[in-house]
Image (cartoon, rainbow, N blue to C red):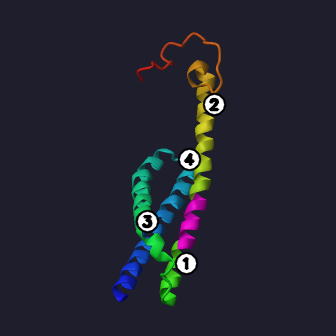
Amino acid sequence: MASTARQQAFSWETLRDLSQRLLELVQQETQILARKDHGALWQLLPEKEMLARRLANTLGPLSQEAQAFAHTLEARAVRRQVQETLRRIEAVNEANGRSIAELLSIHQELLSLLVPQTYGRETHRALPAIKGCGLSTEA
């Protein structure tokens, strides 16, 4: 029982550290979006994906045992920290997602103005392609 509690405590502390780092990354992402430094988003993506995977992999085995993990005040405090951090990550990530979706929509509309038959959302009558501006199907 003591080893299980220690193992669970380690997992929750690991989750706390992972979730805190992921929160820092999504907050960095918010700052990058505000600066309009869209190329820097690509630099965050690998670490963000890795942390999200590690969080999911760590949460999976803990989920059933987590309900019983409330033996000490410290353990409950760590669990609450993790839960709160995960809620904050979700909120910030959703806001960032909306910003990115809006940015992509703006770019798609711009491209549809330049070459409507290639990038438009609606079906347009085919216009003659502008030399150098169309996409081949192989691309």
Q: Amino acid at mark 2?
A: Glu
Q: Residue at x 54, y 61 (%)?
A: 27
- Name the front one of labels 2 and 3: 3
Quadrant of the frame with the C terminus: top left
Residue that badge 4 annotates? 36
Specify start and end residues of the magenta stretch as a single range.
83-92
Could you tell which of marks 4 and 2 lies nearer the N-terminus?
A: 4
CB under 8 Å between discs 4 and 2: no
Question: Disc number at residue 60?
Answer: 3
Q: Is residue 90 magenta?
A: yes
Mark 4 to mark 2 CA distance (whole Å)? 18 Å
Question: Disc number at residue 80?
Answer: 1
Locate residue 59, reporting x and y percent. 45, 67
Q: Amino acid at mark 3?
A: Gly
Q: On the image, which quarter does residue 53 sit in?
A: bottom left
Residue that badge 2 annotates? 109
Locate residue 55, reporting x and y percent. 43, 64
Side of 57 relative to 87 (left or right): left
Mark 4 to mark 3 CA distance (whole Å)? 36 Å
Q: Is residue 3 magenta?
A: no
